[in-house]
Image (cartoon, coloured by chain):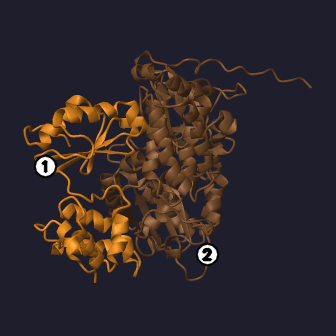
Chain colours: A orange, B brown
Amino acid sequence: MPKSTDYKKEKTNQNMSVSFSADKLKEVQQIIARYPEERQKSALLPVLHLAQQEFGGWLSTETMDYVATLLQLEPIEVYEVATFYSMYNLKPIGKHLLEVCQTGPCMLNGSEEIVAYIYEKLGIRPGQTTADGMFTLKTVECLGACGYAPMLQLGKNYREHLTRQKIDELIASCSGQSTVATT
Amino acid sequence: MGRKLLLEKANVPGICTYEVYRREGGYRSVEKALKSLSPDQVTEEVKKSGLRGRGGAGFPTGMKWGFLAKPEGVPRYLVVNADESEPGTFKDRYLMEFIPHLLIEGMITASYALGSNRSYIYIRGEYVWVAEILERAIDEARANGWLGKNILGSGFDCDIYVHRGAGAYICGEETALLESLEGKRGNPRIKPPFPAVKGLWGCPTVVNNVETIAAVVPIINDGAEEYAKIGIGKSTGTKLISACGNINKPGVYEIDMTISVEEFIYSDEYCGGIPAGKKLKACIPGGSSVPILPANLLLKTAKGETRMMTYESLADGGFVSGSMMGSGGFIVLDDSQCVVRHTYTLARFYRHESCGQCSPCREGTGWMEKILWNIETGKGKMSDIDLLWDIQRKIEGNTICPLGDAAAWPVAAAIRHFRDEFEWHVLHPQEAQQRNYGLMHYADPIHVPNPVMA
């Protein structure tokens, strides 16, 4: 069983109780069943995705410890994985995470202007969150949408062939000021 | 109009559903393989087809399958590499998104050949919706008896699972991918042992790219000889090229490997030329890791021959004057683009994606990024260009996995072919902030010396 030190407790979000619902626990069992017996460590990446989705969009130490318990792993095995992959957020993020691709092909098609325009609209630079906690901006490396550049990822979806107008619409729809469907 | 084997049906309405895919002739290769061929015969067909790995390395697929160890009582695994993250590459996504059953069909046939009863698709974490499409296709295949126990009464059991990564380019390297599939950090393993002997959970494993496995379907359906008839020399069959950058029609194109690079860029059937009246300056023909070529060397080899879209022709001249087919990520730069800035974004990419195991890569990628940034922002020195050259040479070949080489090559090629653009940045730091170097001599005809008559 992983031990929770006071230091860890301090860092976690006290308002969030870290425990999957019965439905989600069933999903965890289904994920584990994809792998041979005794290989439940393989379920770590998908279960971390699920945990991040369920517990506020990021992985607190408490969440990681909980995942360790579920999969019968040492906490360190979870931490070393969570810190390696770029999709796991180790700090709280805004309600909407804008991940703008900035690698070569997107740069050729104006990704830098997109990042600058988001700053103009929201006043946030990469790595920052708006004061109201609505938006976090992140620049990311190649997301495999090079032909549809410039692009960003918002939640599950890719938003491609971005223009200033599309950014306007996207921000408006996230802010609930518009009924424009952007999905 | 070239022949299409993979994407021929990709635009049929509803092809992503089982009913339509089956109606259009889907899953015939599984029937043929399981009912009339032995696993070894399937492998033999793939060998004869000349199919080469479509992920980047171009290794003969049949040979890779032939290396798979088959010890008694030890499970074997097929793992499909759908981690597509090489900048410029988005072909596998297209295939999985539009015609997912083609991959599932290829996987069942390949699993039969390899004796894998449990096969995995390792897909990059960001492709969330693509993973959902694949899972739906797998459920449909299972519901219709193509997966599960005793498929078609053949006694062969097989199931397929989708495993999502979580954002790491390095997991496209096959041993890092296996580590990640085991729930660990994506640190590449030292080879040997190769995955064919000790792969997933220590068992013999074949890792193949999505497009490679999809190509098994037409090979089994039409026979290896038919497949090998398409293309030139050792570049058999068709290849998916994902074209991007400064072109009129970015997208995924299936080419039979008989067309020239020039035709690919300028023909309306493919990229449709360079937009806004601009000119072709440079191109990375096979994903960000392969050498960039200036327009003149891209269209013609150093010998003055027309460069073709084949493995051999793209590599003609080695790294001195050629490049590679790589993953088929075709990145075009027009004359308004800055090669230094573009190279900088790639260096930043590799620094971000280095797993950190090997010092030359972990440290060297960061140094290259910094130096390139200095040159780009007018703070570079002439000696920096030589320093960059020195660093990339010290990375190449000195790391566990090919990410080191992949980080070194773009920098090396940029300096090799565009050294005067780097020097211009150093000599004119202010001017370089305001405008780009432009096309200059990069599209000039190459001087080909007359062959000496013996």
Which quarter of the rendering shows the C terminus of chain B? top right
Residue that numbered label 1 is attached to: A133
Residues packed near mark 2 inside 10 Å, few (<14), some (14 to 19) or many (20 plus): some
Above or below for B73 versus A26:
below
Q: Is residue B89 left or right of residue B19?
A: right
Give the spatial CA distance, label 2 vs label 1: 55 Å
Query: What residue is shown at x 13% (from left), y 47% (from top)?
Result: A134
Q: What amino acid does circle 2 point to?
A: Lys
Image-quadrant location for residue B444: top right
Q: Position of residue B306 (x, y in %)?
A: 66, 27
- The mark closer to the camera, 2 or 1, is 1
Above or below for A126 versus B377:
below
Q: Position of residue B15 (x, y in %)?
A: 36, 48
Q: Position of residue B264 (x, y in %)?
A: 53, 29
Which residue is more in the foreground, B10 or A162? A162
Query: What residue is shown at x 40% (from left), y 18% (from top)?
Result: B276
Q: Is residue A4 left or right of residue A86?
A: left
Residue that numbered label 2 is attached to: B70
Q: Is residue A44 left or right of residue A3?
A: right
- Residue B266 in view here: no
